[in-house]
Image (cartoon, rainbow, N blue to C red):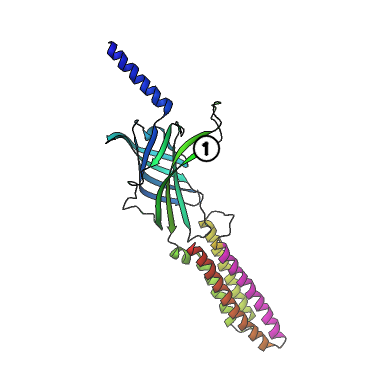
Amino acid sequence: MRYISILLLSFSLITLNCFAKGYGDVICGSYPISIYDLDFTHNNFKVIFYYWGLSKTGYNAGKNMEISNATEYKLEFNEMDKVPGFDRSNVRYNASVIKNWDLTYFPFDRQILEVIMEDIVHEENGLKYIVDAKNSTIDPLFSIEGWSLDKFEMKTDTHIYTTNFGDESIKNSKFSRLKLIFHVKRFGGRLYASLFMGFFIAFLLCLIVYICPVDSVNFRSSIILGAIFSAIGNKYVIQQSIPPNTFVLLFDAIQIITFIIIFYTLLVIIATQRLAISGKKEKAIFFNQFSLLFTIVFYVIGVIVFTRIAFVS
């Protein structure tokens, strides 16, 4: 009976010591399965991945670990077993993660998707993550529809909460964080052609205006009106595809260039009509031809420059 009491006391002391000091270093690895539903309207994406943690103190990731930048996540299974020299925690997560998208170069944008994990109980002095870079990799069947994965990496850092969570004995709280980082690039060629088609049609309609006789004001005016409707319609289609943004996007640049060309073409129609009425038809034809050349050079160079900047960014 005495020996049983000693064993129980020893076990209690070990348990209390574990809770007091935490779990020490935990070697963490990950095996992402899928990223899907990249939602630009609601600023999130979904990810499925496996996680394992190796410790010598029986750390159970499924019990205390949270995905701190997720709106919701599901722990699909949580198992504990032993491998040579370590206690291993195996977990599978399915999470919806918050992401503020950078759409400056849409649809040739690159995004950095981060999944941030931390223990909700133990601070850094009681638990510190170490990356298992050797065994962390991507599933061979991993794919993101419409995107390519340029790089996957895992990092750790220390996150400082500027509060003591009610513990007056400390000033700030420091927690070790584990980050899964995905560098992805969109396949934007086909999307670019379909999204900006209305702007390009508006540009072609402007070119048709210059081909028409300078004194055909009614016909030229109806064509430029079609260009205006095409550009405005395209503008609203794209605005429904991407959320509001405070930065100048590729979409904004091409839109501005298109409306500049439409406005300039409208001025050319008025100017050439006045010249033709005043008996200066030759000057009207010359100005019309010059404006045609200017329109082509200005629009094509502008679109190519801004598109290339977005593509190589």
Question: Can residue 218 be seen here?
Answer: yes
Q: Main secondary structure of the magenta part?
A: helix
Give x and y (percent) for residue 12.
Answer: 36, 19
3 falls in the magenta region: no
Nearest the viewer among 161 and 230 is 161
* Helix, strand or loop status at disc 1: strand
Give x and y (percent) for residue 301.
Answer: 55, 73
Give x and y (percent) for residue 108.
Answer: 47, 61
Q: Which residue is mark 1?
A: 160
Give x and y (percent) for residue 226.
Answer: 57, 71
Quadrant for the N terminus, please: top left
Crowding around mark 1 (Cα neighbors within 10 Å: few <14, some 14 to 19, many 20+) is few
262 falls in the magenta region: yes
Q: Which residues are magenta?
A: 252-278
State the residue at coordinates (40%, 54%): 151
State the residue at coordinates (33%, 19%): 10
Q: Residue furthest top?
A: 1
